[in-house]
Image (tube, helix red, strand yellow):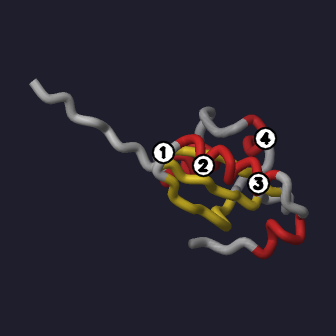
Amino acid sequence: MEQSVRMNIYYVYLLKCADDTFYCGITTDLERRIREHNHSLLGAKYTKGRRPVVLVYSKKYKDRSDASKEESRIKKLSREEKNKLTIT
């Protein structure tokens, strides 16, 4: 019997919080995760006190490793560089 291989797509995303700060993360379900950040106890501790959050950037990756590298790169950007990112 052939096993099906599940292909996950990973999203790296950047949120702008109500206090004008940024939050960067990785998820396999972007819409759900943004909903969690804005309305649920499942949102990140950082964003819970900074609601509402708005998606300002996202990019798809085929594997977790590449997504993690991009997340790390974005987290190291200056505030000015993060402000220049746009939704793709």
Q: Locate residue 69, reporting x and y percent.
A: 68, 48
Secondary structure of the residue carrying numbered label 3:
helix
- Which of the two labelled residues, at mark 4 and mark 3, occupies the earlier sequence position? 4
- Which of the two labelled residues, at mark 2 and mark 3, occupies the earlier sequence position? 2
Tag 3: Cα neighbours inside 10 Å, few (<14), some, or many (≥20)? Answer: few
- Which of the two labelled residues, at mark 4 and mark 2, occupies the earlier sequence position? 4
**CA distance separating discs 2 and 3:** 10 Å
For the residues carrying marks 4 and 2, which lies nearer the camera in this image? 2
Tag 4 and tag 1, C-beta contact below 8 Å: no
Tag 2: Cα neighbours inside 10 Å, few (<14), some, or many (≥20)? Answer: many
**CA distance separating discs 4 and 2:** 20 Å
> Residue at point 65% right, 44% down?
68
Q: In which quarter of the image is residue 43?
A: top right
What residue did someone put label 1 on?
28
Horizontal side, residue 60 vs residue 14: left or right: left
Tag 4 and tag 3, C-beta contact below 8 Å: no
What residue did someone put label 2 on?
67
What residue did someone put label 3 on?
73
